[in-house]
Image (spheres, rainbow, N blue to C red):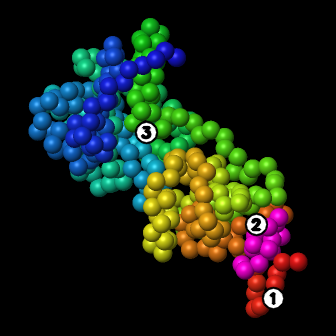
Amino acid sequence: MRSKNINMFLMDGTPTGLIKCTIGNWIGIVYKIPKSELERCKKDKNRDDLKQSGVYFLFGASNETGKPVAYIGQAGNRKNGEGILNRLLEHKRNADKDYWTYAVAVITANNSFGPTEISFLENKFCTLAIDANRYEIKNGNDPSAGHITEEKESEMEQFIENARLIMWALNENIFEPVKDAPAILPNEDNLFYLTRKIKSINFTVNAVCKKNDEGFVVLKGSKISPLVKDSVSIGIKKLRASAKIDSNYILLDDISFLSPSGAAEFVIGNNANGWEYWKNKDGVELRFCKGENADDWTVHLTRNGKNLVD
């Protein structure tokens, strides 16, 4: 792949506000628009390009599970000239689609999308998103691909590749398949495992922790809870907010903790006794395991004054 120059204009000076993205020598334009800024866009004459035809995405989270969701749609250039912006405002007023918090609009600088191109793009974007399986796609029906010449299809495929690249730059990985990450790593004496089903959201946590001289490390590739309860300590909440976690709640970096309970609390999003929750490859709780530094663990491995370490 050749190098690309992506121009990302932060209209409000912040990555959480309006963003306009372009690529040199490409006719496409991609907007990221917070739901709260749609009315402002309608009043701003500089955003008249949003009144043309295009394809759009609504991004949010499920009210039931907290998992990421997306809706993919299209908007033609209507007689009133309102096009894609008017369609987004209609969604904003629709109570059935209150899950979304921001939209991404894909348009062209010269308003060159016709009905055929829009249908093709909507179909391809939906197919890519469903195949990637990162988001719950809220579309009720599969959009039709329409009829397009092979020459035009080749042109549109290049358009799609640039749009995917910008979505990735915007930290939207809706099109990128989940890379296989080992939920259970090769057995080692200093590895411990935590598997727990959260019944309220039908979600199974599957994490791996490694003991080292400094404490306990939750390893990348661990699948952690999407929910964090109010009872969780402030420190763990901050750590969860700053950790790199993908849309399937797979941890992307190792995270270190001074205690196994802190590691367990981070993983399940609730208060937890890590000495009971973490188990070795044989299913033995950490508190009953004798490690190389068993003497250092004795203070944690007692019950009713009885030493539990052989």
* Magenta-span inclusion, residue 32: no
Say if residue 289 shows up in the picture.
Answer: no
Mark 2 Cα-neighbour bin, 10 Å: few <14, some 14–19, many ≥20: many
28, 239: nearer the viewer = 239
Q: Which residue is painted at 26% across and 36% down in the image?
A: 10
Q: Which residue is painted at 45% across and 72% down in the image?
A: 230
295, 28: nearer the viewer = 295
- Tag of residue 279: 2
In the image, is residue 37 above or below residue 107?
Answer: below
Residue 212 percent coordinates (x, y): 71, 58
| Residues rendered magenta in the picture | 286-300
Asked whether the beta carbons under mark 3 and mark 2 sit within 8 Å of each other, the answer is no
SS assignment at label 3: loop
The amino acid on which the numbered mark 2 sits, given as a three-letter code, is Lys
Q: Image quadrant of residue 39?
A: top left
In the image, is residue 299 above or below residue 121?
Answer: below
- Residue 91 relative to residue 163: left or right: left
- Tag of residue 306: 1
Residue 68 percent coordinates (x, y): 46, 50
Q: Which residue is painted at 46% across and 54% down in the image?
A: 242
Identity of the residue furthest to the right in this view: 310
